[in-house]
Image: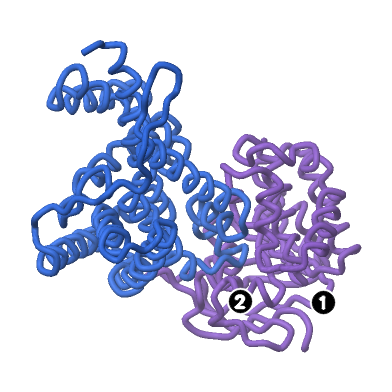
Amino acid sequence: MTGGLTIDRIDVSYGPRSALRGVSLEVAEREIVALIGSNGAGKTTTLRAIMGLTPPDRGTIRFEGTDITRLAPPAVVKLGITLSPEGRRVFPQMSVEENLQLGAYLKTDTVEIAHTMKRVYAYFPRLLERRGQMAGSLSGGEQQMLAIGRALMAKPRLLLLDEPSLGLAPIRVQEIGQIIREINAEEGISIVLVEQNANMALRLCQRAYVIESGAIALSGTGAELAASEHVRRAYLGG
Amino acid sequence: MDILALLPQAGLNGLVIGAMYALMAIGFSLVFGTMRIVNFAHGEFYMIGSFVAFFTYAQWEVPFALTILIAIAVVGVAGAAIEWVVVRPLRTDELSSMIATLGVSVVLQNGALMFFGASPRPMPDVVSGLVHLGPAIFSASRIFVIVAATVVIGAFWLFMQKSRTGRAMRAVAQDQEAALLQGVDVERIFPFAFAIGVVLAAVAGVLMAPVFSVSPFVGATPMLKAFIVVILGGLGSIPGAVLGGLLIGMIESFGATFLGGVTADMLQLGVVIAILLVRPAGLMGRKEA
């Protein structure tokens, strides 16, 4: 596979503590792939490994044919992968618009940046209303929109979303889900969706992986996993 | 002497000293904010700035505008180099990097002592004459310092607010990892932030060289006061540094004029303690997340 992302048997550790063991995962072009699992299972670590924040000890990560295993985050961003991180991590003392501008830090074409920003505002009209407001004063849901919008500003071909539904009211979760689907369809961006909310993730994705104690336990289409006895008992509350 | 005649003079001196403290504090705060490093050598860059002013302007009679540019170039390059050679290898260890900057301070101060000697050198004013404002008469050289410092602080503010690099520095200060995720090459930002921080100290040194004298030890007091101003204004806040600098400068000037220098110093610290009791994060500071 030349397009998309291929993770081949990576091991990741934080100091002496092993976080991922032999994780393999594939994301095809234009695909939404969900990665579900409980707290501490290794979901966030997988995304950090892709971005180059926590490089693997072993194994390889390839994106569109390029080996990105040891690249630093700015180089990974440049190749077309961005992350909307866990906990949103917006820049609190900057305006909404400045946060978005930072998302386009590696872009130099101001016309293109303005155009992308317009698209982001179209997805999240709420952000347009609040463009001059400090990001730290936004509600949790608005900050989540900003984090996703910021990640879109670099015009990625692969978007990594870490727990976009965390801490949001159910109605907002639906909204975000709808927007994720639109972004995928309209922009043709592949998406890795990391979620504890397995319900939402399995409905949105084409394929999904279940990660348990640092290793992939199950994989299949969203529908297959939603039907699996194990997933239903462990992640869907019934 | 008439007390009413002293008031405007004390006010003007307060502005001069305050502007200098603000410049010092902004630079110190920039380095701490982006790199989490307490730069104990900050005052030494003030000292280098004042020596550059002495040699280029007083000795070689270079135009003053050029003197400022030379100081910016010399200290900027030196600052980036020091970040690269001394601070960078110790980045992951805050305590060691602090001690390293203390070492840089000792080396620079003693280097200056070796080459230039300990005796203070006077430096001529950059502009001469008097300015009449209503009934009050001010020395033009003092007003020049205030104007020049305001221009530099304004330029720095614009750079931080409007430029791509300035925005990246603020991002690094607020969340280093999130900045990295936007593609900001943090390793390239650090020497730049360090250089700009110490350049601001050098500019303060250049501007103040005619007001105070020039010697290897002139950096100590501005450094100490910058410390106080940064804590008072709020760590990492540029408006806080300006406000804090002016406040400390005014207390110092009025205190020294009417109560004497020793009392002024005590008063200064008393006011700082009182303000911090009410606002622990400083005048414009935000609580650390």
Residue A129 can be seen, yes or no: yes
Which one of the lettered chains is coloured purple? A
Q: Is residue B100 above or below residue A197?
A: below
Three-letter code for the amino acid on which mark 1 is drawn: Glu
The residue at which mark 2 appears reads as A75
Residue B99 as seen in the image, left or right of residue B170: left
Chain for colour blue: B
- Locate residue B229, reporting x and y percent: 32, 36
**Chain hosting mark 2:** A
Q: Distance from label 1 to label 2 (Cα)?
A: 20 Å
Per the rendering, the mark at residue A29 is 1
Question: Residue A1 occupies which quadrant of the picture?
Answer: bottom right
- The residue closer to the viewer here, B145 or B83, is B145
Q: Where does residue A9 sit, x and y in percent of width and height?
A: 58, 83
Q: Secondary structure at mark 1?
A: loop
Colour scheme in use: by chain
Q: Which residue appears at 28% of the width and 71% of the height?
A: B86
For mark 1, name the chain.
A
Please tell me which of labels 1 and 2 falls first in the chain.
1
Residue B210's tag is none
Image x and y of residue B50, in percent? 27, 55
Crowding at mark 1 (Cα within 10 Å: few <14, some 14-19, many 20+): some
Residue B18 percent coordinates (x, y): 35, 35
Q: Nearer the viewer, residue A182 or B39?
A: B39
Q: Amino acid at mark 2?
A: Ala
